[in-house]
Image (cartoon, rainbow, N blue to C red):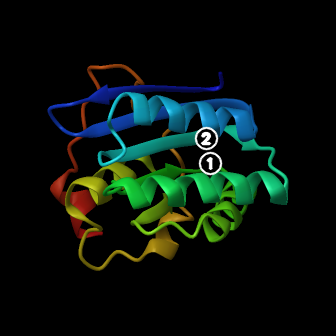
Amino acid sequence: MPIVWGVNHAARLVSAKATGELGRSDFEGYLDGLVAAATMSYRKVLDMTQSRLVLSSDDMMAIGNRVRAHERMGPMGSVAVIAASDEQYDSFRQFESVLDANRPLKIFRDAEMAYAWLTVGLPEGRELDETRRLAALPDDFGADSNVRTPAVSPARRRR
């Protein structure tokens, strides 16, 4: 499966890294795993920098319906997606609009900004459209049970 993920229960954080082409079954398997691990309410980071969405409109609708069904079962954690290219960014933005999920979801180009947003929100004076122009940091985090949230430097917070 092209989505490998790990959980830091103490931080209530799921870190996932996607590789290759991602289809409906990949997202369904990921969601199944999150439900089985009782982590739907945890914050999530999905690194998409080394992957590509391969989803039809029907696939997107089916995944969106599934996510909304999970929302009716309990609270859902915020999701930060890291995209490397404009194509990835636009594909996930389209996917996001179809999902129509009832929880915070933001797309970033920078792993540090994604983790910072999940931890404390966007730094003062920083707009989301600025994150689209930043270079991605694809290997900044591992998808294992020892995932650590990177510290955000004071200089980075002020930008």
* Quadrant including the N terminus: top right
Nearer to the camera, 39 or 97: 39
The x and y percentages for residue 69 are: 51, 56
| Residue identifier under label 2 | 49
The x and y percentages for residue 2 are: 65, 25
The x and y percentages for residue 70 are: 46, 52
Nearer to the camera, 151 or 71: 71
Residue at image x 49%, y 42%? 46
Residue at image x 35%, y 48%? 112
Residue at image x 51%, y 75%? 129
Query: Could you tell me if the residues under marks 1 and 2 are in contact, i.e. CB atoms within 8 Å?
Result: yes
In this picture, residue 38 sits left or right of residue 92: left
In this picture, residue 88 sits left or right of residue 102: right
Q: Residues within 10 Å of mark 2 (few under 14, many from 20)?
A: many
In this picture, residue 9 sits left or right of residue 142: left
Tell me if I can see residue 47 in this picture. yes
Task: Check residue 50 in the rendering and tell me which mark sits there, or answer none.
Answer: none
Task: Answer above or below: position of 7 versus 85.
Answer: above
Q: Residues within 10 Å of mark 1 (few under 14, many from 20)?
A: many
Residue at image x 71%, y 54%? 62
Task: Say which label, 1 or 2, has the lower sequence index.
Answer: 2
Q: Secondary structure at mark 2?
A: strand
| Residue identifier under label 1 | 84
Q: Secondary structure at mark 1?
A: loop
* Quadrant including the C terminus: bottom left
Task: Answer above or below: position of 154 versus 49.
Answer: below
Amino acid type, label 1 = Ala
Tell me if I can see residue 138 in this picture. no
In this picture, residue 64 sits left or right of residue 46: right
